[in-house]
Amino acid sequence: MTLIALAVAALAAGTPPVTDPVLTEMVALYDDLCLKAFPDDGAIDRAVAARSPTVLSPDQVRIYLHDDPGRGWWIDDANGRFVITIEAPPYHACSVRRLTDSGFTDMTAYSTRLASYSASHPGYTQMAPMDMDIGDIHSHATGVQRALTNGGSDTLFMFENRPATVSKSKTGVEIRFVRQLASPEAH
């Protein structure tokens, strides 16, 4: 069942979501920064500045974006550290990521916000889940995508990145929410 279908089913059944303060904060950051402010750079700057961020150095940004151009911040609050990155076109993307002990057990808060956003922005369709191993990290992604009138696309992704093999060192599970606007040249 897709994330959107799960959220609709949970809402219809009146099932209250499990309230996880970290996930709640992460969804709020994604909503404010990536769904509302992005892609307006000025709006992003104002929304991030209101949260007393730490600006990432170019080397720190490279940890998250590798060779892709962009910028980023750490936002620390009572729920820990969240990483915000903005990738420059042709894949213009806004992401909120968080390292967790083992991921989230109930993604209702995210899927409910995704369902609400996609309902008010018609044209999104569910993408097939993607799985890939990059080094020792297994990445699982789900998302919805819509075509834009300029020939580009608007995609809302959720990535869960976890160690591909069990190791004695505890590294945790990274959860990442992404909104990606791909220009026609990127397709």
Image (tube, rainbow, N blue to C red):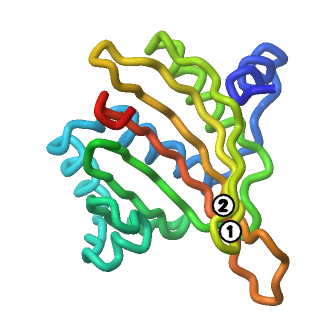
- Where residue 61 appears, x then y in whole percent? 34, 70
Mark 1 is surrounded, within 10 Å at the Cα level, by few (under 14), some (14 to 19) or many (20 or more) other residues, namely some
Q: Nearer the viewer, residue 73 or 22?
A: 73
Q: Is residue 20 above or below residue 185?
A: below
Q: Is residue 107 left or right of residue 110?
A: right
Q: Secondary structure at mark 1?
A: strand
Nearest-to-viewer mark from 2 and 1: 1
Query: What residue sits 72% from the left and 25% below the top?
Result: 7
Query: What residue sits 74% from the left and 71% below the top?
Result: 163
- Where residue 134 appears, x then y in whole percent? 63, 66
Residue that numbered label 2 is attached to = 161
Mark 2 is surrounded, within 10 Å at the Cα level, by few (under 14), some (14 to 19) or many (20 or more) other residues, namely many
State yes or no: discs 2 and 1 in contact (Cβ < 8 Å): yes
Q: Which mark is residue 115?
A: none
Query: What residue sits 65% from the left and 45% below the top?
Result: 141
In terms of sequence position, does the residue under pointer 2 or pointer 1 come before the other? 1
- Where residue 71 appears, x then y in whole percent? 27, 61
Image quarter of the C terminus: top left
Q: Amino acid at mark 1?
A: Ile
Q: Is residue 55 above or below residue 44?
A: below
Q: Is residue 154 above or below residue 104?
A: above
- Where residue 167 appears, x then y in whole percent? 81, 84
Q: Is residue 70 above or below residue 142?
A: below
Residue that numbered label 1 is attached to = 137
What is the C-alpha distance between the residues marked 2 and 1? 6 Å
Q: How many marks?
A: 2
Image quarter of the N terminus: top right
Q: Nearer the viewer, residue 62 or 67?
A: 67
Query: What residue sits 75% from the left and 36% below the top?
Result: 17
Q: Secondary structure at mark 2?
A: strand
Q: Amino acid at mark 2?
A: Asn
